[in-house]
Amino acid sequence: MNCLNSIEASYRAELRELFDAHFGRFDEKLERRLLDTKAELGIAKAELGIKIEQLRVELHSTKADVLKWSLGLWVPVALVVIGLYFKR
């Protein structure tokens, strides 16, 4: 019986060593992938910030254009209405 226990113990020890070796490699790969993902996320975040800033500038420009067109259209209409009112 001691012989079987010693064989089982040696198999367990070998299995533990294999497990530790494979788990160590898996842990290293996982750590590398995590660092790569964090780097990619940082780059994407920076790019997104730049795009948001570009959209903010474009929106400001669009708002200014809408205001110009609005004033350009409503001022003559108001002048015509006022002119027609005083013409009576």
Image: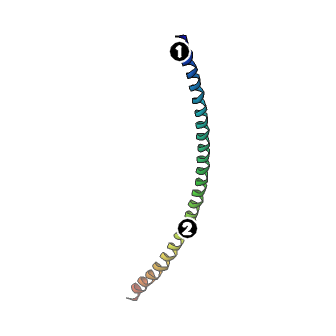
Depth check, front residue: 70 or 11? 11
Kind of element beneath mark 1 = helix
Kind of element beneath mark 2 = helix
Numbered disc in front, either 1 or 2: 1
Q: How is the image coloured?
A: rainbow
Q: What residue is disc 2 on?
A: 58
Query: Measuring 58% from the left and 50% from the top, which residue is drawn there?
Result: 41
Q: How many marks?
A: 2
Crowding at dot 2, Cα within 10 Å, few <14 / some 14-19 / many 20+, comes out as few
Does 13 sit above or below residue 82?
above
Find residue 46 and name its label.
none
Crowding at dot 1, Cα within 10 Å, few <14 / some 14-19 / many 20+, comes out as few
Query: Measuring 53% from the left and 15% from the top, which residue is drawn there?
Result: 4
Q: What residue is disc 1 on?
A: 4
Query: Measuring 43% from the left and 81% from the top, which residue is drawn there?
Result: 77
x then y, percent, for residue 45: 58, 53
Does 26 sit above or below residue 14?
below
Query: Distance between the Cα atoms at labels 1 and 2?
Result: 78 Å
Depth check, front residue: 2 or 59? 2
x then y, percent, for residue 79: 45, 83
Q: Quadrant of the C terminus?
A: bottom left
Q: Are marks 1 and 2 in contact (CB under 8 Å)?
A: no
Depth check, front residue: 23 or 60? 23
